[in-house]
Each structure stands twice: as structure tokens, then as C-alpha cells.
Image: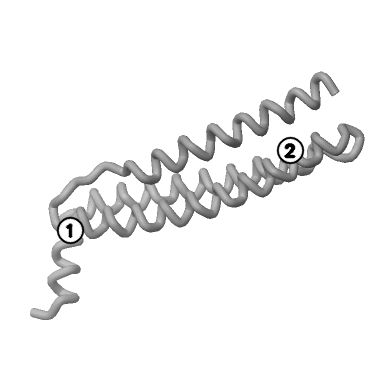
Amino acid sequence: MNGTQSTGSTENKYVQQHLANERTYLAWVRTCIAVAGLGFLAAGLFNSTYGEKAHLFAVAAGIGSLLFAFSLLLSATLDYQRKRRDINEGVFRSSRLIVNLTLGFMLVLFVLLFVLAGFLLFG
């Protein structure tokens, strides 16, 4: 028996866990798309009528959300691959990196968006 058959039979044994892992990964991909879209929306909402500071915050929010989406996608991909291996080995480890990364970036983006909302409401 070669290594490919062994891996295939192990993956067949845990098919439900692998499918759940794939669904979770696809949910992270959808989240990345939404975060990137939020950045484009924030950057597009504020033009020169709101002043230079609002424009700078909008650009920072746009670029920050794109960087966040990229790093989140990279982390989700690495987490998916690690979980795939862990499922086959019968080991469970929680996803601390991706959760902490998401929390940190979301806090920064919310602060930027609140500042942008302040410019929008109070000029």
C-alpha cells in the first residue's frame, strides 16, 4: 500500500469533518470578500467635499481592509491545511491565530469607520 492510498482511506474515514472544514474555509473566504468590499465602500464614500482628513481616513480604511482581507485569507488557508492534517491524525487544536488576527484588525477598522462616520455626520 502506498502513501496515497493510506491518506485517501484516512480522509474517507473522516469525510464529515473534512467537509465541515471546507465549509468553514469557504465562510472565511466570503468574510474576506465582504471585508475587502467594505474597504472599497469606505474609500469611495468620501470624496474631497469632506476635506483632506476624511479622505486620508477613507484611504487608510480602504487599504487597511484590503490588507486585512489578504492576511485573513492567508491565515484561513493555513488554518484549513492544518486542520486537514489534524483531522487525519485525530488531533484537535483551536484556531487562536485566526481569531486573534480577526479581532485585532476588526477593532482597528471599526475605529477608522467610526472616525469616518463622524466626518460624515458632523463634517
Could you tell me the amino acid type at mark 2? Phe
Residue 88 got which mark? 1
Q: Are marks 2 and 1 in contact (CB under 8 Å)?
A: no
The residue furthest right is: 49
Q: Percent from the top left, x then y, of residue 34?
A: 58, 43
Vertical comparison of 85 with 21: above or below: below
Horizontal side of residue 72 vs 113, given as left or right: left
Vertical comparison of 74 with 2: above or below: above
Residue drawn at 17 percent across, 68 percent down? 7
Secondary structure of the residue carrying numbered label 2: helix
Could you tell me the amino acid type at mark 1? Asn
Q: Which residue is mark 2?
A: 57
Q: Nearer the viewer, mark 2 or mark 1?
A: 2
Figure quadrant of residue 85: bottom left
Secondary structure of the residue carrying numbered label 1: helix
Structural distance between the alpha carbons of marks 2 and 1: 46 Å
Horizontal side of residue 74 vs 54, given as left or right: left
In front of the other: 118 or 92: 118
The residue furthest left is: 1
Horizontal side of residue 95 vs 6, given as left or right: right
Mark found first going from the N terminus, 2 or 1? 2
Residue 18 got which mark? none
